[in-house]
Image (cartoon, rainbow, N blue to C red):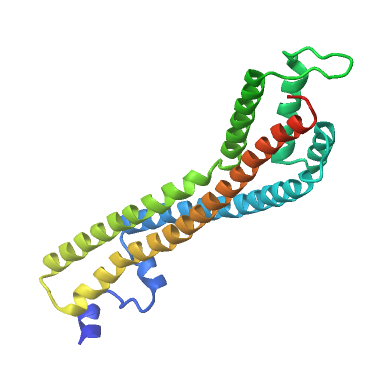
Amino acid sequence: MIGTLFLQLGQAIPRSPMELITSSTGATKIVLGILVVLSLLSWGIIFAKWYELRRAARITYTFAHEFAGAHSVERAAQMARVSNGPPATIMERAMRFIQETTPALAGTAERAARFSGSQVEALRLVLDSETTSERDRLSRWVPSLATIGSVSPLIGLLGTVLGVIDAFLGIASKGSGNIGAVAPGVAEALIATAAALSVAIPAVFAYNIFAARLNRIEGELETFGSELIALMVREGMV
C-alpha cells in the first residue's frame, strides 16, 4: 500500500540514507553541505594538532628527563638548543634575560656576581610569560574544535526542524496523513541530526584530549622554569 501511495504521488521510496540525501529538499542539502565543510575542517585540525602536540610532548618530556643531569646553566642551554622545541624557546629567552641583566650583587675575587631576589623574580615572570606564549602557540586552532563540537548539533537541529516543517507542508498539500507519507520526510529530517552528531562527537573528543595534553606540556614547562632557577642557585648565580 505504501508503494502504491508513493507511485500515486510520483515519488520513489528512499531505501537508504544516500537516497534520502539525494532526494532531500534544498534546505536540508544546504545544512548537510555546511556540516561537510565543518567536518573536513575539524579532521584537518585534528590530524595537524595530533602530530604537532605529539612531537612537542615527546621533546618536552625527553628534555625534562635530560635536564635533571645538567650541572650548569650553560649546559642546560646547550641541551635545549639541541632539543629544538618548546624548552629551547623558553631557555633562549631565559639566557637572553640573564645576559642582558647586570647582577645586582657585585662579586669579589672569591665570589662571582649574583642576581638579586627582585631580578630572579623578574626572570620567573619572563619564564611564565614565555610558557604561556608557547601554550598559546601550541593551542592555536584547538578552540575551533570546541566551537565545531557545540555549533554542529545546532545546525543539524535546524536542518531537522526545516525538514519536518517541509514534510508536514507536503502532507497538508497532498491531503494524506498515512504513516507511509510521513515517514520518508521525517527520516530525511533526521539525516541532518545524524550528520551533525557525526561531526560534533569527534571534534569534542579530540578537543578534550588536546586540552589535557596541553595542560601536561604547560606543567612540564613550568617545572622546567622552577628547576632552572634552582640550578642558578646551585651554581651561585643567585
Residue at position x 58%, y 39% from top? 135
Coordinates of residue 219 in the picture (x, y in percent): 59, 44
Q: Which quadrant holds residue 83?
A: top right
Kindly give the residue lying farthest to the right in the view shown.
109
* Residue 174 placement, left or right of 52: left
Q: Is residue 210 visible?
A: yes
Which image quarter holds the C terminus?
A: top right
Residue at position x 78%, y 19% from top? 99
* Residue 67 placement, left or right of 42: right
* Residue 18 placement, left or right of 101: left
Coordinates of residue 195 in the picture (x, y in percent): 40, 63
Residue at position x 60%, y 33% from top? 133
Q: Which quadrant holds residue 230?
A: top right
Q: Is residue 33 above or below residue 105?
A: below
Residue at position x 36%, y 54% from top? 31
Coordinates of residue 197 in the picture (x, y in percent): 39, 62
Which image quarter holds the N terminus?
A: bottom left
* Residue 44 placement, left or right of 10: right
Kindly give the residue lying farthest to the bottom in the view shown.
1
Q: Is residue 8 visible?
A: no
Q: Nearer the viewer, residue 94 or 181?
A: 94
Q: Nearer the viewer, residue 108 or 224?
A: 108
